[in-house]
Amino acid sequence: MRIKTNLTFVLTLLFFILTPAFGDSGKYSARDAAPEELRIWVDARAGTGKPVHWIAEGGVFEYPSGRKLFGMIGFDSSTVIWPDKPGGEIIHLTRKTFTYTDAETGEILTEYNGKPVEPIAYPYQLIRYRMADGKIYGDVEQGIEPNIQVIKAKEGLPTRWLGSNTLAVTAAVFIDMPLPGGQQLEAWENYDFFLHSGEAVGEPHQMSWQRYGDLPGFAGQGKGIYHLLSWRVESHDEFSPELLEWARTNKPMWLQPPADIAEVLRLQKGKAGKSWD
């Protein structure tokens, strides 16, 4: 009797010690064991189960005059694959698409000055996250064979708390790379994410994006300032009617993220069109 009682006590104690690190399935939860900032970031960007979407809208402005040339609308669709055990790689599967609109009417453009307007469309991005030294690192894989790109995170995404309920995550991107024909691509982009907890903010997932670089190819020569505001929605019901109609008509695949890594592998072997320019 004494042995049985002691064994029961030990098993009960172990249960309470280990339970916080286990998910609902009883498997050890890498999500629960992740650093707080990394978990908040992944949950916000890719959700915790069913797919989530980040809607964006903004514009393109002539530099240095500031004249608005075009509007922009778009979205990404994302999901996440957490590893079975802590320390494994966290995989964010996403695809995103954006298109240009008339600066005054907001109508989606299909041509401009006689040139076709092609949407920006990534059939997939596979992002592997980790955290070190207080920064979030994400290596991005994209493209089709034989030109699959793996963009390694070198600087990381710094995080900081604004008060006790808002985590700010910043990604500054400086682009300086050769192009076919001897030209050089130079641009600057900055992403500021504001991830709020609690009930004080109606929209807890917010992002502001800026870019300085060449105007879209159809717009001719010159530099431009791009600016988008983005926020997360949980379903297509929260898309604007115009954006949802455009997506269903022109980019239906983008309304869902890649289902799994197997789909990404198929896309890497298929024809992705001009989306990788």
Image: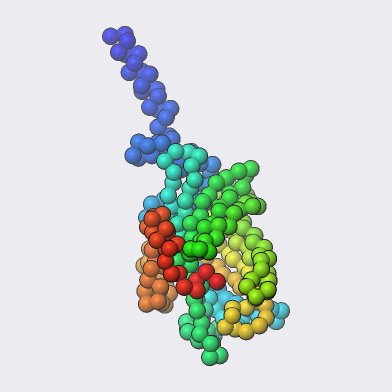
Front residue of 75/162: it is 75
Q: Is residue 4 above or below residue 40?
A: above
Residue found 43% across the figure and 63% down from its top = 269
Residue 110, horizontal then vertical, whole percent: 47, 84
Q: Is residue 244 visible?
A: no
* Residue 238 found in image quarter: bottom left
Judge from the rendering whether residue 244 lies leftward or rightward of residue 134; answer left or right: left
| Quadrant in which the N terminus appears | top left
Residue 47, horizontal then vertical, whole percent: 43, 54
Residue 197, horizontal then vertical, whole percent: 51, 51
Residue found 53% across the figure and 49% down from its top = 129
Front residue of 189/205: it is 189
Judge from the rendering whether residue 212 lies leftward or rightward of residue 146; answer left or right: right
Q: Residue furthest front?
A: 146
Q: Is residue 9 above or below residue 217?
A: above
Residue found 51% across the figure and 51% down from its top = 128
Q: Is residue 4 visible?
A: yes
Judge from the rendering whether residue 227 lies leftward or rightward of residue 21; answer left or right: right
Residue 126, horizontal then vertical, whole percent: 48, 57
Residue found 68% across the figure and 71% down from its top = 184
| Quadrant in which the C terminus appears | bottom right
Front residue of 145/20: it is 145
